[in-house]
Amino acid sequence: MLLLIRPLPPAEETVSYTFSFTGTLPTGLSLSSGGVLSGTPTASGPFSFTVTAADTSGFAGSRPYTVTVDNAPTATVVLNTATPGTNDTLTATATRADLDGQSVSLRYVWKKNGSTVRDVSKNAGTAADLTDSLDLSVAGNGDKGDAITVEVTPNDGLTNGTVASASATVANSAPTATVNLNTASPKTNDSLTATAASADADNDTVSLTYVWKVNGSIRKNNHYNCFD
């Protein structure tokens, strides 16, 4: 009979590690010996450091890290009117802020019924960055009943802030008319003829009402529809 005797396998060991770092942690953060990075960052910018984990036997391993701390910038925007006419110019006026004191650029995206018609970024660092305009008289930019939206995105060079937006609906534009008389000094038995012209920015049909007065009193009132 053959008896084989084998040693029992060793019990698994529990290995503990001690963590340390070299370099610069983000201001306001700390690394515990147990490897927990905690705290609240109080300064922005990139921070580079190397974390080392060492066991009780003296073996160690390291890994470098780079952490960027940044507060997102903010922006607001308002329009000069919520009910522009077809040939009006919409002007967006924005504000911007950054808790870290970084320069903030602004991106303006104008949309008509959800489709982009103008996209421009401004980063001159002056008051000129704070306004942008959309000329509704330009074909395709907006007509009666169209919904116009401007979206403003702030960026501090590291992070985009929350998009600010404002909206308007293109309103009906009042028609215009001009009129001329065939003479400014008619005689008693002459006939006066009024010749009128009408226009409408929305290309709507315009009707004309002629009201003739003598010494302020109405003598004739005619209504005509114009289809040209």
Image: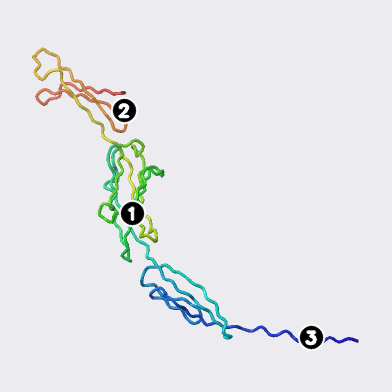
Q: Residues within 10 Å of mark 2 (few under 14, many from 20)?
A: few
Q: Which mark is residue 6?
A: 3
Total numbered circles: 3
Q: CA distance from mark 3 to mark 1?
A: 75 Å
Do the residues bearing badges 3 and 1 touch, measured as CB atoms within 8 Å? no
Determine whether 45 is above or below 135 in the image.
below
* Identity of the residue drawn at 53% across and 79% down: 53
The x and y percentages for residue 78 are 29, 51
- Residue annotated with mark 2: 205
The x and y percentages for residue 107 are 35, 52
Q: Examine the image and state in which quarter residue 198 appears.
A: top left
Disc 1 vs disc 2: which is toward the camera? 1
The amino acid type of the residue labelled 3 equals Arg
Q: Residues within 10 Å of mark 3 (few under 14, many from 20)?
A: few
Do the residues bearing badges 1 and 2 touch, measured as CB atoms within 8 Å? no
Which secondary structure lies at badge 1?
strand
Determine whether 92 is above or below 43 in the image.
above
- Residue annotated with mark 1: 106
Q: Describe residue 69's horizontal placement relative to residue 207 as left or right.
A: right
Q: CA distance from mark 2 to mark 3?
A: 105 Å
Q: CA distance from mark 1 to mark 2?
A: 42 Å
